Amino acid sequence: MKAKTFLAFVAPSVASMLLLIALPLVGVVFLSVYQSYVKTELREVTTEVPLFGGQTREVTRTVPQPVLDENGDTIFIWEYVGGRNLREASEIEGVVETFRGPFPQNEGLGGKLNHVYKRISNYDFWSALEFTLLYTFFTTPAILIIGLGVALAVNRVTEGLRGSLVFISLLPMIVTPIVSSSAIFWMFLDNGIVSVILEQLGFGQIYFLSNQISTRILIILYGIWFAAPFAFIILYAGLQTMPRDPLESAMIDGANAWQRLRYVIIPHLTPLLAVITMIHVMDAYRVFEPILVFGTSVYANSVQYLTYFVLGVQDNIHKAAAYSILTIIGVVILLIPILRHTFKEQKAIN
């Protein structure tokens, strides 16, 4: 293929990546290392204060007022702060001070570690990072196991039933995250259908969203339910490309179902399992919708939700940009072992 032809094919993709990925990323990095504020100056402002009898009195105060340019627009000052926003967002100085002590006296190692954990959990970023990692580490293996199990089960049924089963299995992924998480939230409210049924069965009133453990479990279960169809459809497609000869040879050699799965099917699906893992890790680390819908950020927070809160509620675009950079760093760190393992396997095969 000629160079001009090759460039003609890849140019639209490269341009799209530069426009939609590279430029926004550069903008986020720029915002994270700068701090902006409105330029103000002190001015005397005189106002009339009403008194008794219809009289008024003039009061002069010195108040800060924004400075305007020739066009009447507010003047903003941009100050380069380097990594200050990242340090403030990550609250790394507080974590360092926590490890320096002082620690509770007359307590063993377990008591001191518990003290450190409680202190670090009080910081917004580290509390959000804790649940983000829990969500990622629990949902990733779960969707792989469930997706593989459903794919194997659907692959064994007759051709006439496969279409319907595939459609039913994909329903959680078809519904948008906001709608599906809202449905789960309404089901587990204090007067929701699940709570009412359990109360009628004699379990008493159960408040699922009133404590940290049950709230986190619900969000993790929702994440598994929502993402498992993605793993299923990819693994099911991979099973359709599975050659029959290795399976038949294994059966002739006396391999049971578990041995055929372990030594024939899973090695064939390993590249797909790696792809699913990488995509889900990137997606799970950015968990946002269920935390927003459940409204339980006190019990379960995430780095992505913290970015939204800082930008939308606190209106601090620079700190939000710093959280975005920390999110990217976290995703890259999690992906490095997966990429290294995949690279080693591909190198061994070649």
Image (cartoon, grey):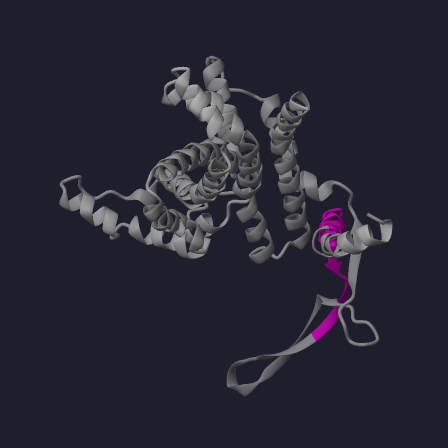
Let me know if residue 249 is in the magenta part.
no
Residue at image x 39%, y 38%? Answer: 155
Residue 15 at x, y percent in the picture: 76, 56
- Taking the image as shown, residue 280 lies to the left or right of residue 189, namely right
Residue at image x 53%, y 33%? Answer: 273
Residue at image x 41%, y 49%? Answer: 170
Residue 276 at x, y percent in the picture: 53, 38
How many numbered badges does the structure rendering display?
Answer: 0
Query: Is 146 above or below relative to 109?
Result: below
Let me know if residue 34 is in the magenta part.
yes
Residue 249 at x, y percent in the picture: 45, 21
Of residues 155 and 11, the one nearer the viewer is 155
Q: Which residue lies furthest to the bottom in this view?
A: 54
Q: Quadrant of residue 225?
A: top left
Query: Is 155 above or below relative to 36?
Result: above
Residue at image x 28%, y 44%? Answer: 207
- Taking the image as shown, residue 348 lies to the left or right of residue 119, namely right
- Taking the image as shown, residue 9 lies to the left or right of residue 198, namely right
Q: Quadrant of residue 64?
A: bottom right
Q: Residue furthest right?
A: 3
Residue 168 can be seen, yes or no: yes
Residue 327 at x, y percent in the picture: 62, 41
Q: In which quarter of the image is the C terminus?
A: top right
Of residues 97 and 48, the one nearer the viewer is 97
Of residues 246 and 175, the one nearer the viewer is 246
Query: Is 165 above or below relative to 143?
Result: below
Residue 259 can be seen, yes or no: no
Q: What stretch is highlighted in magenta?
A: 22-45
